[in-house]
Amino acid sequence: MDAPLWTETHAPALEALPQPEVRDHLDRAVAEPMNLVVFGPRGAGKTAAVRALAAATHEDPDNDFVVINVADFFDRTKKEIRNDDRFSQFLEGRSGLSKRDMISHVLKEQAAYQPVSGSFRTILLDNAEAIREDFQQALRRVMEKHYEATQFVIATRQPSKLIAPIESRCFPVPVRAPSHEETVSVLESIVEAEGVEYDADGLEYVAGYGDGDLRKAILGAQTAAEEAGEVTMQAAYDALGDIGLRERMEEILAAADSGDFEDARSDLDDLLYDDGYEGAAVLQELLAAARARYDGDELVGVYELAGEIDHEMAAGNTDRIHLSRLLAELGR
């Protein structure tokens, strides 16, 4: 999409968050700043909720609210991290650091900054399911040292991966997947604000396409609006009907890459058993998603492995066994 993303231009204020229980928890955090663990499924609105909290808390959120995406460290090479403009200033002249030490140093530097306005800053550690235990120990020490001037917020899909000393220092804020009705309501408010024509069936279709992932639903509505100029049933179907599988394969690859094999295999089972896709179709879409995710030797390796899997599926046994092996090999 060339236009600004609707997820950003229509980010909700604290009072407009669709889940009243989340609003209540965060209202309390505005009145009484505290460290938080915000947890829930993908696309439920965790990051949007924390951004709303920061906007309500800080007079100058552009300077006093910092987002550190954990995946930007642990899913990338050290060279890529050093060349990232967001981190290079903190790592200049510090060679030989491990990834853990690199993110720890960036975090210490950010936590040591004085707030521009007010008495504290907020640091969001986003996508913290990628967080390793050794880094969590370093994070605990930073939290202990800078607790007076820094509020730490950890957003994650898997709070069970957090060590006890981190959990004990944070108030839990569960964010459930939005209901179908809540998703439709959010979509309606956005398309009306954008002045885009729509019908009820179109919003229902897009909400179903999101399937509990509010971010996916909002971007799906924007895709339909950009391609057809409206969010009607026909426009939504034409724009989204053929891309759902590709996006799901991208999510499965991401889960396999990060070592979440059980999540990846569960999503694979949904495609094969609940949605009725043939193994060959899943493999074809997996390769299409792989071309966007990998390059060079990595992509060659995926294609070689896919060739083996294709041969094995043709020889017999269940497609699930062979496709699961492919995901396990990617994770390994």
Image (cartoon, grey):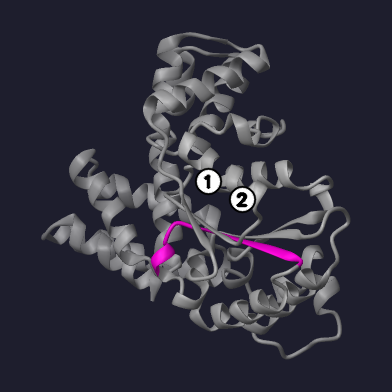
Residue 168 among magenta residues: no
Displayed quadrant of residue 294: bottom right
Residue under the point 66% across and 47% down: 30
Location of residue 44 in the rendering, given as x and y in whole percent from the top left corner: 47, 42
Residue 155 among magenta residues: yes
Q: Is mark 2 on a helix, strand or loop?
A: helix
Above or below, 120 relative to 20: below
Q: Choose between 7 and 160: the one closer to the eye.
A: 160
Q: Mark 1 points at which residue?
A: 25
Above or below, 130 relative to 56: below
Residue under the point 39% across and 52% down: 286
Q: Mark 2 points at which residue?
A: 29
Q: What element carries label 1?
A: helix
User: For the view shown, which residue lies furthest in the right direction?
Assistant: 116
Above or below, 139 relative to 220: below
Displayed quadrant of residue 113: bottom right
Number of labels in the image equals 2
**Circle 1 crowding by C-alpha within 10 Å: few under 14, some 14–19, many from 20:** some
Q: Choose between 244 and 134: the one closer to the eye.
A: 134
User: For the view shown, which residue lies furthest in the bottom direction?
Assistant: 96
Q: In which quarter of the image is the N terminus?
A: top right
Amino acid type indicated by mark 1: His
Location of residue 12 in the rendering, given as x and y in whole percent from the top left corner: 63, 33
Is residue 175 shown left or right of residue 120?
left
Is residue 329 shown left or right of residue 195?
left
